[in-house]
Image: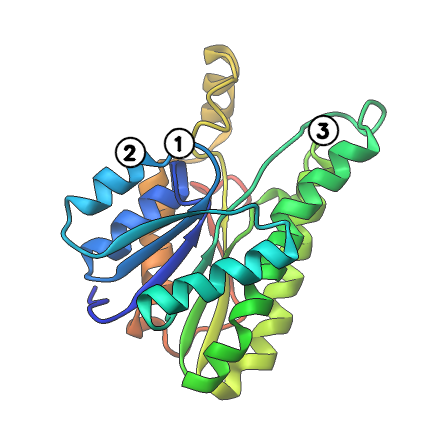
Amino acid sequence: MNFEGKVAVVTGGYSGIGMAVAEKLAKGGADIALVGLGPKEDALELIGRIGVKVKAYDCDVSDFEASGNVVKEIIAEFGKIDILVNNAGICRDKLVLNMEESDFDAVINVNLKGAFNMIKHTYKPFMRQRSGRIVNMASIVGLNGNAGQANYSASKAGLIGVTKSVARELAARNVTVNAVAPGYIDTAMTQALSDKIKDEIASSIPMKRRGKPEDVANVVEFLCSDAAAYVTGEVIRVDGGIAM
């Protein structure tokens, strides 16, 4: 799909799904602003080889002021923002019995408030240019819940609510807002699980395999494209059928 002349911001873009999304959009011609924390060299090298403009911005998206500053920096550097992919996320899985308040707050602050912060600070630019795409990375556990993930499930369910509400607010300005809800995807976040548990999860998926970051990136690419110009407020599962 063609994204030439577009500027895409991908939070949590230094690795995993975020990096796959950034790569996919870059291959379509979009210039890329990566927002994240931690090692970024792999992502910069990968996208740099494609030949588009790319720059990384270290930012904790849960920090309202820092998020505002990074949006200003990106607009100053790239001139505009056409696409915002809110992918930054963390997990601190525990049964509620053992979950500390700090575990709950940290996940909500990054996964939910972080997305709000980035939407808040890009809201006026999107309105002024009367075009744009926002894609929020939800999860099937935001739809179905999951034992040991009350904090993560709450953050993703909240993000779905934000998606639908902001979609209504911005629809008249030709800005679409959608969510993607991945199932079990092979990323660094899931690598800590044992092979036995990974195999058990795979066996429970109707397609009998774990997802790849590229599977999610393909759907994000569509939602960011002109082909999805009349799609807004939707939540698309990418889960191999596990939540059917």
Q: Report x, y in % for residue 146.
A: 68, 35
Is the residue under label 1 in contact with that under label 2 (CB below 8 Å)? Answer: yes
Q: Is residue 14 left or right of residue 162?
A: left
Real-space CA distance between mark 2 and mark 1, rounded to the nearest whole angstrom: 8 Å
Helix, strand or loop status at disc 2: helix
Gap between marks 3 and 1, in whole Å?
Answer: 28 Å
Camera-side mark, 3 or 1: 1
> Which mark is first along the chain, 3 or 2?
2
**Kind of residue sitting beneath label 3:** Gly
Q: Are marks 3 and 1 in contact (CB under 8 Å)?
A: no
Report the residue marked by disc 1: 39
Residue 145 shows in the view: no
Instruction: Judge from the rendering whether residue 15 lies leftward or rightward of residue 121; answer left or right.
Output: left
Q: Secondary structure at mark 1?
A: loop
* In the image: residue 238, left or right of residue 43: right
The disc at residue 108 is none
- How many C-alpha atoms fall within 10 Å of the one at disc 1: few (<14), some, or many (≥20)? few
Q: Amino acid at mark 1?
A: Pro
The x, y position of residue 20, in whole percent, is: 32, 43
Separation of residues labelled 2 and 3 (CA atoms): 32 Å
* Residue of label 2: 42
Percent of width and height locating residue 231: 43, 73
Q: Which residue is mark 3?
A: 148
Name the image quarter holding residue 159: bottom right
What kind of residue is marked 2? Asp
Q: Are marks 2 and 3 in contact (CB under 8 Å)?
A: no
Residue 209 sits in which quadrant? top left
| Colouring style | rainbow
Residue with the most extreme right position: 97
